[in-house]
Image (cartoon, rainbow, N blue to C red):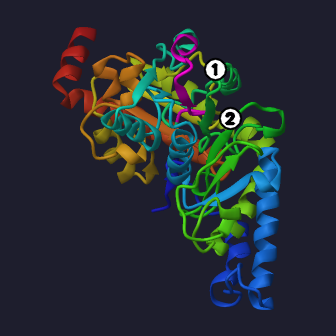
Amino acid sequence: MKEIYLDNNATTKVDEAVFEEMRPYFCELYGNPSSMHFFGGQVQGKVVEARNRVAALLGASPDEIIFTACGTESDNAAIRSALEVFPDRRHVITSRVEHPAVLTQCRNLTQKGYRVTEIGVDGAGRLDMDELRGAVDDDTAIVSLMWANNETGVIFPVEEAAAIAKSKGALFHTDAVQAVGKIPINMADSRIDMLSVSGHKLHAPKGIGVLYLRRGTPYRPLLVGGHQERNRRAGTENAGAIIALGKACELAGQHMELENTQVKAMRDRLQKELMAAIPYARVNGDGADRLPNTTSIAFEFVEGESILMHLSERGICASSGSACTSGSLEPSHVLRAMGVPFTCAHGSIRFSLSRFNTEAEIDLVIRELPPIIHLLRQMSPFGREHLKAQQ
């Protein structure tokens, strides 16, 4: 059975061109890029090229790029660094809809005496900017807000939020793992201090990330014990993955327009036709500015896990929310923060597309999903009651 993969916010297929770029750096060119000899030096040259490619996608300078192991490490490094840089500031601000990589760390900080404010969102998932303005004060060390939500695709006004943070001398960090490669980013014309990237969200392999660190921003490394990354992240460079990420960033820049035209058009058609075919459904985040590849649709009176199981039997891969919270029986914290009703939050499905999806795949999902929802509603006590009321 050929899979139809619509779970690209969880992880993406490694582009074959990316794989070919990294392939020689395992069994052939395996030298340590920090070594003095020619064998390591040729790898170092490719690492430099990769750093330049990542910087180009972000509109940054190569020296502002720190390679990490993943987006989660980048998030943790940014927040912990800010707290070390400002030891007298004991206040951290984030949002209620952050990825667990940020939210869990912030909540853990409350056990160490820090004051943490979680900014709310409205029914469409838009950040409450008035609440943010009122929360930032002279005790705030860092404001960490995601650029785009991983479940709904809703985009936050991070530049405006960064300006608010900077007005009180706080650092601003954004978890941009879902935004990079999908929407244009130019750090040269930005007030953001730190930004997290995850390679496997943009067709590079898992196990590689980036922390963008604006030049001049005070920083304390999370990992120490080596000179790598200009003493900002110790540990032997994951050269193959770094080289792959560089290639993936180069391709992401080349495909940016396609992401916002063809991919967006497929996402819009999928959303429109499912909404037309299935009654009592709603788009989570509708009306807000969203990523071009993401739609989260709530189907009332059914369980998301049951929908996913039936889709999986037909070769269709989607998600009920963040892959990092899968397995939890609790409804999504993102949808709860948005005030999505209980009967909708439990039946929400996220479809996240990529440039590798086709119109024929979208046609198949549009054909297969409506009868699945109808079947599950007939089996559900809430659904049966609802269908009976319709008759």
Circle 2 SS class: helix
Toward the viewer: 161 or 379? 161
**Quadrant of the frame with the C terminus:** top left
For the residues marked 2 and 1, what is the alpha-carbon distance in whole angstroms? 38 Å
Q: Image quadrant for the N terminus?
A: bottom left
Circle 1 SS class: loop
Q: Nearer the viewer, residue 298 or 46?
A: 46
Specify whether residue 74 is painted magenta. no
Quadrant position of residue 273: top right
Q: Amino acid at mark 1?
A: Lys
Q: Percent position (x, y) of residue 110?
A: 34, 32
Q: Say if 196 sits above or below 133 in the image.
A: below
- The mark nearer the N terminus, 2 or 1, is 1
In this view, the residue in front, 321 or 122, is: 122
Let me know if residue 391 appears in the view.
Answer: no
Residue depicted at 32% across the width and 29% down the height:
374
Q: Residues within 10 Å of mark 1 (few under 14, many from 20)?
A: some
Chain part drawn in magenta: 132-149
Rendered image quadrant of residue 328: top left
Disc 2 target residue:
264
Question: Residue at 41% of width from left, 41% of height from top?
Answer: 105
